[in-house]
Amino acid sequence: ETKASDCKPLRSLVICPPTLTGHWVYEVEKFVDSTYLNPLHYSGPPIERSKLRNRLKSNVAKKSYNLVIASYDIVRNDIDFFSSISWNYCILDEGHIIKNGKTKLSKAIKSLSANHRLILTGTPIQNNVLELWSLFDFLIPGFLGTERQFMVRYSRPILQSRDAKSSSKEREQGVLAMESLHRQSLPFILRRMKEDVLKDLPPKIMQDYYCELSPLQAQLYEDFSKSKARENLEDTVHRIEQNFDTNVSSVHIFQALQYLRKVCNHPKLVLSSAHPQYESVISKLKSQNSSLSDINHAAKLCALKQLLLDCGIGCQTSNSLIHASEPIVNQHRALIFCQLKGMLDIVENDLLKVHMPSVSYLRLDGSIPPGSRHSVVHRFNNDPSIDVLLLTTLVSKH
């Protein structure tokens, strides 16, 4: 006979981006008593992780860890250890990371053994429905067939039906394929809406601010439109539309689009010393007693400054000047996201430090180690005197 005390419950595993591992530990410790969930933050360099593995193996019953929290890359690197354990629950946070079933990361995650599997994601499909197959290949292997079977039954008909030149029969087949996929997959998908969880929050209000390009931005944009790069870009787009060949000059087209995006953000992002117009632009700005750091050369910075002022952030009053030693708590606080780290530098150095020195802020980007990022977020959330949190979109996704 087996005594109940001999049957130790299986551990569970949470896999998430490195930025969120500390957040998971914090939330578990905040809401669940350690009697029920005792989390282990499995992170650090190889030597540290080796010590953690020994702690997991030599746990005494009273202090045993029944929840392990680790990042995707660490699980992939230590897959021999993780795949040797039978887990109770295996939870993937931001699970769309395994959307490509051919990557080493996806294959490693799918090799784990668990009684129950769960995926949390805000974007189950980002590009095409084949990504949904990869997620279900982790959740219920074989449920949607093999990858090839899924392509034939669902992915290809749906893709063909969206072609502008598709026939009525192809469009009908696409609709039928979509309905069939919904019947198969939707019973396993629980959609959580904000109003279902946080009823006290007001509805989200979205406002679009349209910014006219500055004269310098317009000049750079116009010069590009007249260049050979623009001709090549249009030619590439045309060939892609005609042949649906996404590999045609893919490097060149993305370089061109990246250049245009940088111009729209700030001229400083493209006007390096290697730029053919660098010298002439700098000379012209000097004659106007200006420089590239002037925020008036970037329409977005001017709009951002006005938006912050409208929210009461950066508005110095006589009272605030008198009591400068006391932290000032404004009515509103802001998160400012930038796609590029270089743009974040510009917002910090050219806008906040020069034009809005009274604004207190924290910064979160790739230069901050993943293990330290949660403490930055925690500090911002718990200190209302900090007006702004600067983030890159890449870090916020993780």
Image (spheres, grey):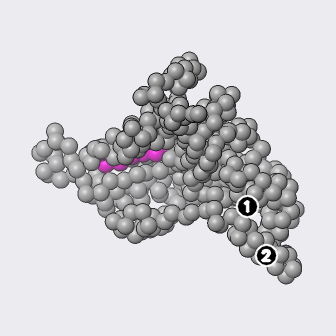
Pair 1/2: label in front:
2
Q: Tell me the residue at 68%/47% (across/down).
A: 98
Which image quarter: residue 353?
Answer: top left
* Residue shown at 16% from the left, 42% from the top: 326
- Residue 171: x, y in percent? 81, 77
Residue assigned mark 1: 129
User: Is 113 placed above or below 249 here?
Assistant: above
Can residue 397 be seen?
A: yes
Q: CA distance from mark 1 to mark 2?
A: 14 Å
Which label's residue is closer to the chain start, 1 or 2? 1
Give the magenta-colored segment's residue range.
386-392
Badge 2 is on which residue? 176
Q: Where is residue 39 drawn, in percent x and y? A: 46, 35
The one nearer the camera, 252 or 101, is 101
Residue type at the position of mark 1: Val
Q: Quadrant of residue 167?
A: bottom right
Q: Residue at x 49, y 24 (%)?
A: 59
Query: On screen, 49 above or below 132?
Result: above
- The reply to whether the magenta stretch includes residue 389 is yes
User: Amino acid type of disc 2?
Assistant: Leu
| Residue drawn at the location 81% of the way across and 57% of the way down | 145
